[in-house]
Image (cartoon, rainbow, N blue to C red):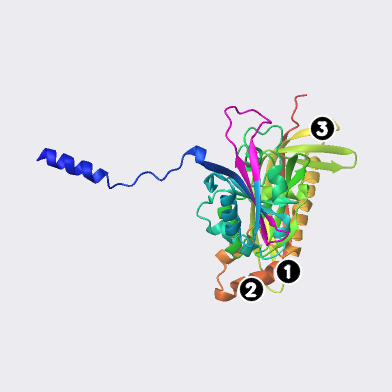
Amino acid sequence: MRRRIGVLFVLLLFGLSGCGFKDIDKRFFVVAIGIDQGKEKQYKVSLKLAIPRHRIEPGHAAFQIISQEADTISEALELMNSNVDKELDLGHSKIFIIGRNLANDELLTKTDWIFRGSDVQRIEYMALANPSAEEILEASPRSERVPADSLILSFGHEKIGSSLAVTEYLYDFYNRMFELGKDPFLPVISKKGKSFEVNQVALFNKKELKMVTQPGQTELFSQLVRKPSNFVVSVKKDHLRYSLLIQSFTYRYQIQTPKQQSPILQMDIKVRGRIQEANQALFDKNWGEIERVAEKNIENRYKNLLESMQKHQIDPIGFGLHYMARNHYGKKEWELWQEIYSKMKFNITVDLEIESTGIIK
């Protein structure tokens, strides 16, 4: 009886299908994807393919860039798949880059494939390329050890200590595209010789690019979005110049809508830090006066950034979502918020405490 059961079990094994996994040497690992406006077709899709090496050394990252124009992204990928000798594996892609020329209008339509693609990870980084995604993918800094490593690390937690590092994930970008009261944004990667730099942020409404921050504004935007610590604030008054290393940063805000008056956004910011650099000795200075000068400087910088975003009718911080979550007026709440936001005044209050001059007398 046992022998019959054993024979039957062996026969059943012949009916099982084999593993569909393809060997590594039969696949191309795509580590980064870029999309630009095509010259002849609507899209130009570029892929950065990693070429395996037995030794990993800085400046010797082996990669291949392939590009294809088509009227749809899916068609471009299918054509590229037929032009290489291995299957394209998109599951290892860590960053998705959109060319600047695609961001001018109909952003949702042009990113539809990104959100639907079953092979695309929802935790991919997203960025805007200047001037084009293909040029950014071709960049290979001398410090790069593996293909696209420098791009990925620029947005990962390893680089998050930079006050200019603004990270955006695919899932968050998707949510912002549909969430009323919270607009999308993307960090901007600009070509710089054989390398690149990331010190700007592109701000969108739900359809198109509306504003690109300057490096100074990027730093402020990063603080509002991420609430980081260990960033530097430079202050100047008359002949005194000094830099503060901010070690603690928190803020709260409240939206006030008094009757017969303009709506007000009251933002209270608390910062703690120490003086990192100064052109004069500060031991005998009035620290209270130094703090007041810095507070006024910081208040004006935040107010200018918020007013710039208001002027372009964009809200990446999420003030609208905050307001609608606390005030329910049915179907009219979105229209009401738009009216409030267009008339809103910003009242910024900064509480700065200098804990030390950074050196011992």
Residue at x 77%, y 47% (from the top left corner): 215
Q: Label 1, label 3: how many angstroms apart (C-alpha)?
A: 42 Å
- The Cα atoms of the two marked residues, 2 and 1, are separated by 13 Å
Element assignment for label 3: loop
In the picture, measured across the screen, residue 122 lies left or right of residue 292, that is left
Instruction: Report whether residue 159 is seen.
Output: no
What span is colored magenta in the figure? 36-65
Amino acid under label 3? Leu
Q: Is residue 147 above or below residue 336?
A: above
The quadrant holding residue 77 is bottom right
Magenta stretch holds residue 58 = yes
Residue 282: numbered disc: 3
* Tag shown at residue 335: 2
| Whole-number angstrom distance, CA of label 2 to CA of label 3 | 52 Å
Residue at screen point 57% across, 45% down: 93
Q: Earlier in the sequence, mark 2 or mark 1?
A: 2
Quadrant where the image shows the N terminus? top left
Q: Amino acid at mark 1?
A: Lys
Q: Nearer the viewer, residue 122 or 21?
A: 21
Label 1 or label 3, whichever lies nearer to me, is: 1
Tag count in the figure?
3
- Tell me the residue that label 1 is attached to: 343
Task: Indicate the quadrant where residue 272 lies.
Answer: top right
Secondary structure of the residue carrying tag 2 is helix
